[in-house]
Amino acid sequence: MLSVKQTIDKYNLIKKGDVIGCAVSGGSDSMALLHYLLSIKHEYGFDLICVNVEHGIRGAESEGDSLFVEKFCAQMGVPFYFLKADAPSYARKNKLNIEEAARNIRYGYFYSLISENICSKIFTAHNQNDNAETVLFNIFRGSGLKGICGMRVDNSKGIIRPMLETPKAEIENYIKQNNIEYKTDSTNNDISYSRNYIRKKLMTLIEKRFNG
């Protein structure tokens, strides 16, 4: 993935001796990122761990996704860090929607791994398409200028998005070329989730109307 390497080099995202935590759900983007980081590990001189969160939303399906990621890591010799959570209970207790609750839990775990020096930073698999969706989502929520700018490659707190300037199509090509296995989240097609509605409904219309 040439654009990922270009982003890493442009922003100096990897330093020799880093311990990088790769956030992996088992989905296509995160499995592609984990695969790619493994391929450049020796070139850049960093150590790699895998970070997986099971949010307790999809029952046996999401548990199976976590086991899939754990098995892959065992085969590749990547240390596996896992958190099992109960996002629905957390959402009810804190009066949040399920998406916000899952994100809070996930990022809380990421920051704890960084603060405990288990890793120096966490790489997530957000891509260019995700960022476009985030901008729309923030606008619809009534965001200020910061939200309209979308996600940053580096949030300055140790969360890094090296694929943020990479189109989804490039990631899909990489997956095909390398025969990367991945899991598909059944809730991705549920448009009751705001992000899914934007992705499945609005983005499709926008891309048809405004090519590129």
Image (tube, rainbow, N blue to C red):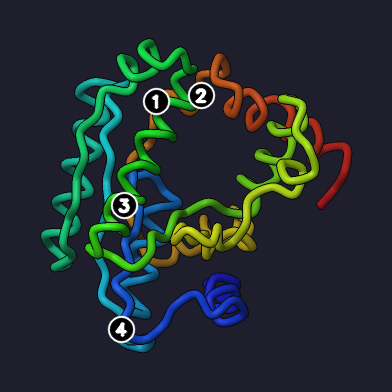
Choose the circle earlier in sequence order: 1 or 4. Answer: 4
Which circle marks residue 186 in the picture? Answer: 1
Residue placed under numbered mark 2 in the picture: 189
In this rendering, position of residue 52 left or right of residue 70: right
Neighbor class of circle 1 (other Cα within 10 Å; few <14, some 14-19, many 20+) is few
Mark 2 belongs to which amino acid? Asn
Residue 186 versus residue 179 in the image, above or below: above
Give the structural element (helix, strand or loop) at label 1: helix
User: Which residue is most to the front?
Assistant: 115
The residue sitting at 34% across, 16% down in the picture is: 88
Q: Position of residue 37 (x, y in %)?
A: 36, 71
Mark 1 vs 4: CB contact within 8 A: no
Residue placed under numbered mark 4 in the picture: 17
Mark 4 belongs to which amino acid? Gly
Q: What separation in Å lies between label 2 and label 1 (alpha carbons)?
A: 7 Å
Front in this rendered view, residue 24 or 147: 147
